[in-house]
């Protein structure tokens, strides 16, 4: 991984570690032990941080920025499994079962990361029930999301899949559901298993039908949550 900078995590690292869900419930002493093993890295946009098939030797936490988890076929076609935001970790799968990396993880924008060596982290895991439970919670959450994705790929048309993706990306803002994160139509297409042109067509259709309103820097979903029936597959 080409890193822009690479340094031992300093004293500010401790306050940062406290805010990471994976480390919730850990004592100051336990956080200090993790801090000692953490290394800070800054990587530019589009850096492949881990590559599918590679040997697993570390766990990463995203401090700032976001990353895409993706798989590619032999022709270079991509499917984006998920987007990871600040506060989320990756690289835990290979760390737990010792298998090679299951997917590529690529920086979606400039990212600041904490990297922890596998051997050190495994030691911390072995002696800490809270850490084990937090990892298990994160894996369960990812399994739920993967189940939802399988369901939408198997049971929904592209309209339903795009509508569900928009709902999943949206957050509550003064009584409205709003999407602020910037996701390209190309990436949306790679998430729902459709072409970019098809995603553009569906988005235009959703806009003309009043389900979404595209504004400067954000997308506002219909106020009465009318998008929900579409995302639930009512068009099928
Ligand atoms: P690992 O297999 O070590 O390397 C790739 C990482 O991508 C993997 O660990 C997980 O951290 C992450 N990852 C793989 N699949 C998913 C998924 N479906 N949802 C979220 N994260 C994933």
Image: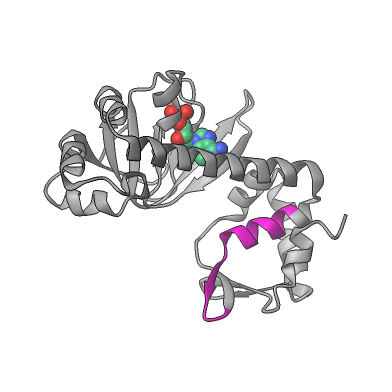
At x 40% / y 47%, what residue is drawn? Answer: 88
At x 12% / y 46%, what residue is drawn? Answer: 10
- Magenta part mainly helix, strand or loop? helix
Furthest toward the front, the residue is 129
Q: Nearer the viewer, residue 49 or 151?
A: 151
Q: Is residue 38 above or below residue 67?
A: above
Q: Nearer the viewer, residue 139 or 58?
A: 139
Q: Quadrant of the rendered structure where residue 235 is? A: bottom right
Furthest toward the right, the residue is 236
Q: Is residue 207 above or below residue 37?
A: below
Q: Position of residue 14 (x, y in %)?
A: 18, 49
Point out the stretch of residues depicted in magenta. 161-175
Q: Quadrant of the N terminus?
A: top left
Q: Nearer the viewer, residue 123 or 86?
A: 123
Q: Position of residue 21 (x, y in %)?
A: 36, 50
Q: Quadrant of the rendered structure where residue 129 is? A: top left
Q: Is residue 99 above or below residue 33?
A: above
At x 42% / y 42%, what residue is drawn? Answer: 46
Within the magenta stretch, is there residue 51? no
Q: Quadrant of the rendered structure where residue 193 is? A: top right
């Amino acid at each position: 991984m080409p890193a822009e900078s690479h340094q031992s995590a300093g004293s500010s690292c401790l306050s940062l570690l406290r805010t990471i869900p994976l480390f919730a419930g850990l004592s100051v002493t336990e956080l200090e032990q993790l801090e000692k093993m953490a290394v800070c890295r800054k990587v530019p946009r589009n850096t492949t941080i881990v590559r599918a098939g590679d040997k697993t030797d570390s766990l990463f936490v995203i401090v700032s920025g976001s990353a895409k988890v993706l798989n590619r076929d032999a022709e270079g076609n991509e499917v984006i499994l998920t987007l990871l935001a600040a506060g989320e970790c990756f690289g835990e799968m290979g760390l737990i079962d010792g298998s090679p990396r299951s997917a590529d993880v690529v920086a979606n924008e400039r990212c600041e990361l904490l990297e922890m060596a596998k051997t050190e982290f495994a030691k911390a895991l072995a002696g800490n029930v809270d850490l084990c439970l937090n990892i298990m919670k994160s894996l369960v959450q990812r399994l739920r999301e993967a189940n939802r994705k399988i369901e939408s790929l198997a049971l929904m048309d592209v309209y339903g899949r795009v509508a569900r993706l928009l709902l999943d990306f949206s957050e509550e803002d003064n009584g409205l559901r709003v999407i602020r994160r910037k996701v390209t139509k190309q990436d949306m297409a790679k998430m729902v298993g459709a072409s970019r042109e098809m995603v553009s067509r569906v988005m235009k259709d959703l806009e003309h039908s009043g389900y979404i309103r595209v504004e400067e820097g954000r997308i506002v979903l219909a106020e009465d949550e009318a998008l929900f029936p579409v995302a639930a597959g009512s068009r099928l």
